[in-house]
Amino acid sequence: DADVTQTPRNRITKTGKRIMLECSQTKGHDRMYWYRQDPGLGLRLIYYSFDVKDINKGEISDGYSVSRQAQAKFSLSLESAIPNQTALYFCATSDFSEETQYFGPGTRLLVL
Amino acid sequence: AQSVTQLDSQVPVFEEAPVELRCNYSSSVSVYLFWYVQYPNQGLQLLLKYLSGSTLVKGINGFEAEFNKSQTSFHLRKPSVHISDTAEYFCAVSGRAYSTLTFGKGTMLLVSP
């Protein structure tokens, strides 16, 4: 089984709809991250959480919210989706004792 | 604040040729440096990282990178590439006090026979 899982893997939605992307990890890491990837722009940090009670905005948090339901679960919500939120979304985890981040397989989101 | 510049968006190369993917960074603090690889339709996988110590870092699949503090660079090299190395490569930097990664825009390595 994969250490970092993301659901759904693909999602098509319409402008104005609320959607949630979910991330779960079995690595026991305390830190979790959400990124979006756009062609030619690399990965940009949306939100991150260093433990269950800690939530921090990243570079591009406008239009997004997150919830850290447990150490192993970190969800990303788009309250009212818009077409320029069409992107590939990645969840990642890391441990405080190790600088490496481990990435999930990604969720491809299309907003019509 | 940190930033990463990957100077080439695409690097075409023939199989068995050497390759260098360039990465420059800027930061006001000491840094950790990383190279990640993304194969088609997959997530990112760590190739190698520099945290401290030797400036020449060896990673998986025969890749290596050299940290050059004076030139603020962390270029990735492989002496002989394979078709299977075709992928997008991302350089990333982390300031030691912050533990979040700042990524470059990526370099697509295209290996042809």
Image (cartoon, coloured by chain):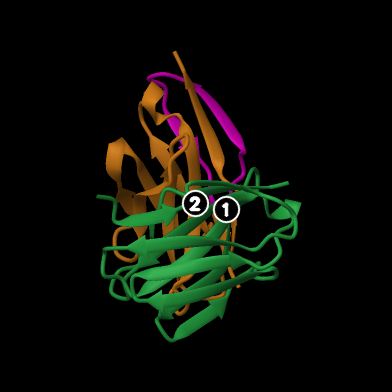
Chain colours: A green, B orange
Amino acid at pointer 2: Cys
**Residue at (57% x, 64% y) in the render:** A45
Instruction: In this rendered view, identify the residue nearer to me: A46 or B73.
Output: A46
Foreground: A111 or B92? A111
Question: Which residue is more in the foreground, A13 or A45?
Answer: A13
Residue identified by numbered label 2 = B91
- The chain holding disc 2 is B
* Amino acid on which the number 1 mark rests in the picture: Gly
Q: Is residue B14 magenta?
A: yes
Query: Can you give x and y, in whole percent of width and height, for residue A10 in the image?
Result: 53, 45
Q: Nearer the viewer, residue B21 or A91?
A: A91
Which residue shows up at 46% across the image and 84% down it?
A: A54
Q: Which residue is mark 1?
A: B104
Q: Which residues are magenta?
A: B5-23
Check the image and report above or below for A71 versus A86.
below
Q: Do we see residue A24 in this rendering?
A: yes
Q: Please say whether residue B110 is one of the residues in the magenta stretch.
A: no
Residue A55 rendering spot, x and y as whole percentages: 51, 81
Q: Residues within 10 Å of mark 1 (few under 14, many from 20)?
A: many
- Disc 1 is placed on an element classified as loop
Residue ID at (32%, 51%) = B57
**Disc 2 to disc 1: CB gap under 8 Å:** yes
Instruction: Tell me which residue sits at (62%, 44%) in the image.
Output: B7
Q: Position of residue A47 (x, y in %)?
A: 55, 71
Q: Is residue A14 above or below residue A81?
A: above
Image location of residue A7, percent across then percent down: 45, 54
